[in-house]
């Protein structure tokens, strides 16, 4: 028994020490400090009972070991709990003109804007809360910093240049490949190009917008011609995202929209060269609702904040999609209802959201789909005030921790056991805080390091 007590104490000590060391590398100072304190305190009762003899110490030792074993069995026993989300397929297709990005874009076109509000008078009252605010990346927004905003704008500008390359001519001779082998090739190549996950689904009508709402295609009906959708995700940097709503989070959004788009454009081009139709769906030029395609391609579930929650990185990803007619092998989707159960109890994103846009309520029904619905106008109103896309909700999500052994063990427990989920949530609050503060901006991009002098540019030849 004494040996068992000492072994348990050593295991506990090294587990929490490991947690502390990992947290130091993750720049989570408070988690590191707390884990270190636990490394010293948790093993203490085991050591006392192993090394000090007093009346009843033997019984107490067995009792402590028994309790430890019982807790382990209860927490590790497979018990996923019940499903809380029913129907996931909407009754109708969504009109892209209803999205906040489209409603923001039509601000530049007085006629279109008037027409939109004439057809959607209910939206006008909702949009009043952001229409008079500075706007995304505006110099008068509260988080404006020239360095980070202009850097983000450079990435967004590059994506804009790529929007015309999402589609193109199809080679006149079709090459025929085994769908399984081709899918394997595409998945491996996509990951080599920087994606963290990739999957294939059969396209459904409701994956496509009904009408386009962005750019030159505004108002055009979307033709649902492609049979397959290849969804891919790229990782968003945790440290930059954690600074949200400050400028680096915007830089990271732009960078990963660009990276995911570049990968998707190459895949689409490759498939067209094989003689089949293919179109990339990238920032500002979508015909599909990416998170839903990605979910049905087996890449994750849609959580409380309405984003794709991936198994490795939670919502800390950007998505791009390629739709095509080339025969591919569909990725089997294994729905994971434990994500919804965790979201039902967690609500951390709702607690930190500065605009209270994330609901704290139970799942509701929207167009026949059981899900949570973010208040998009409130969220966008906050973006238009701060000038960035905020990202606080993504950053604090317990699923957003890095993809490493420590956090993957916790993710495994969350998926495996109903009680583990509840304890993991309390532990996440304990180690990382219920409402963690935004992280500091990296020194190399701090505003005060840059002295600004605005000098009008005069071309040398003039
Ligand atoms: S923060 Fe919590 S409630 Fe929000 S999406 Fe993540 S797990 Fe779900
Ligand atoms: S991005 Fe910010 S404002 Fe929008 S829902 Fe998330 S936390 Fe709230």
Image: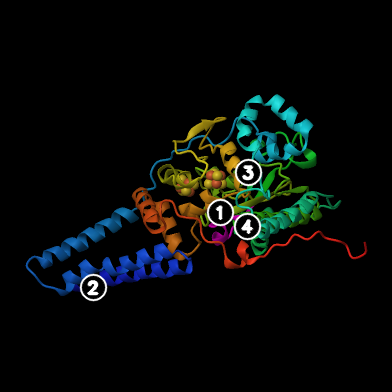
Q: Which mark is residue 244?
A: 1
Q: State how far apart marks 2 and 4 are (Cα).
A: 47 Å
Q: Give the alpha-carbon distance from disc 3 to disc 1, as whole Å.
A: 14 Å
Q: From the top left corner, tell me how far across and down residue 360 is, in percent.
A: 45, 39
Q: To which residue does mark 3 refer?
A: 384
- Asked whether the viewer can see residue 400, the reply is yes
Residue carrying label 4: 252
Residue sitting nearer the eye, 33 or 311:
33
- Which mark lies nearer to you, 4 or 3? 3
Q: First in sequence, mark 2 or 3: give its number.
A: 2
Residue for point 16% across, 74% down: 51
- The answer to the question of whether label 3 and label 1 lie on touching residues, with beta carbons closer than 8 A, is no
Dot 1 falls on a residue whose secondary structure is loop
Q: CA distance from mark 4 to mark 3?
A: 18 Å
x, y (%) of residue 343? 45, 45
Q: Which residues are magenta?
A: 232-247
**Left or right placement of residue 462 versus residue 405 in this view:** right
């Amino acid at each position: 028994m004494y040996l068992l007590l000492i072994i348990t104490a050593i295991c506990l000590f090294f587990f929490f020490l490991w947690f502390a060391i990992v947290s130091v590398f993750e720049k989570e100072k408070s988690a590191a400090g707390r884990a270190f304190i636990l490394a010293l305190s948790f093993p203490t009762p085991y050591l006392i009972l192993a090394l000090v003899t007093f009346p009843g110490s033997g019984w107490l030792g067995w009792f402590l070991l028994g309790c430890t074993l019982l807790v382990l069995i209860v927490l590790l026993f497979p018990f996923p709990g019940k499903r809380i989300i029913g129907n996931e397929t909407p009754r109708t297709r969504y009109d892209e003109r209803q999205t906040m990005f489209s409603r923001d874009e039509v601000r530049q076109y007085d006629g279109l804007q008037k027409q939109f509000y004439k057809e959607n008078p209910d939206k006008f009252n909702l949009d009043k809360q952001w229409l008079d605010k500075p706007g995304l990346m505006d110099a008068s927004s509260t988080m404006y910093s020239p360095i980070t905003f202009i850097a983000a704008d450079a990435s967004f500008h590059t994506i804009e240049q790529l929007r015309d390359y999402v589609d193109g001519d199809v080679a006149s001779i079709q090459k025929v490949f085994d769908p399984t082998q081709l899918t394997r090739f595409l998945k491996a190549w996509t990951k080599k190009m920087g994606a963290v996950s990739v999957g294939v689904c059969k396209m459904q009508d409701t994956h496509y917008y009904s009408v386009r709402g962005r750019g030159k295609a505004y108002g055009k009906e979307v033709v649902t011609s492609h049979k397959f959708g290849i969804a891919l995700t790229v990782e968003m940097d945790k440290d930059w995202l954690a600074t949200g709503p400050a400028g680096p989070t915007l830089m990271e959004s732009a960078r990963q929209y660009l990276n995911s788009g570049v990968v998707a454009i190459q895949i689409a081009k490759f498939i067209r060269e094989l003689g089949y139709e293919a179109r990339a769906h990238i920032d500002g030029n979508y015909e599909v609702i990416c998170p839903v395609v990605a979910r049905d391609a087996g890449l994750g579930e849609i959580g409380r904040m309405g984003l794709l929650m991936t198994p490795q990185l939670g919502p800390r990803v950007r998505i791009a999609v390629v739709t095509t007619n080339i025969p591919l092998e569909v990725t089997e989707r294994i729905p994971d209802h434990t994500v919804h159960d965790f979201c039902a109890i967690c609500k951390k994103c709702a607690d930190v959201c500065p605009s209270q846009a994330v609901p704290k309520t139970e799942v509701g029904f929207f167009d026949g789909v059981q899900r949570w619905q973010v208040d998009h106008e409130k969220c966008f109103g906050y973006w238009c005030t701060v000038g960035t896309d905020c990202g606080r909700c993504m950053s604090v999500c317990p699923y957003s921790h890095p993809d490493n052994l420590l956090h993957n063990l916790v993710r495994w427990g969350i998926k495996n056991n109903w009680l583990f989920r509840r304890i993991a949530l309390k532990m996440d609050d304990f180690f990382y805080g219920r409402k963690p503060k935004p992280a500091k901006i990296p020194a190399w991009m701090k505003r005060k390091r840059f002295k600004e002098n605005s000098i009008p540019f005069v071309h040398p030849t003039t």
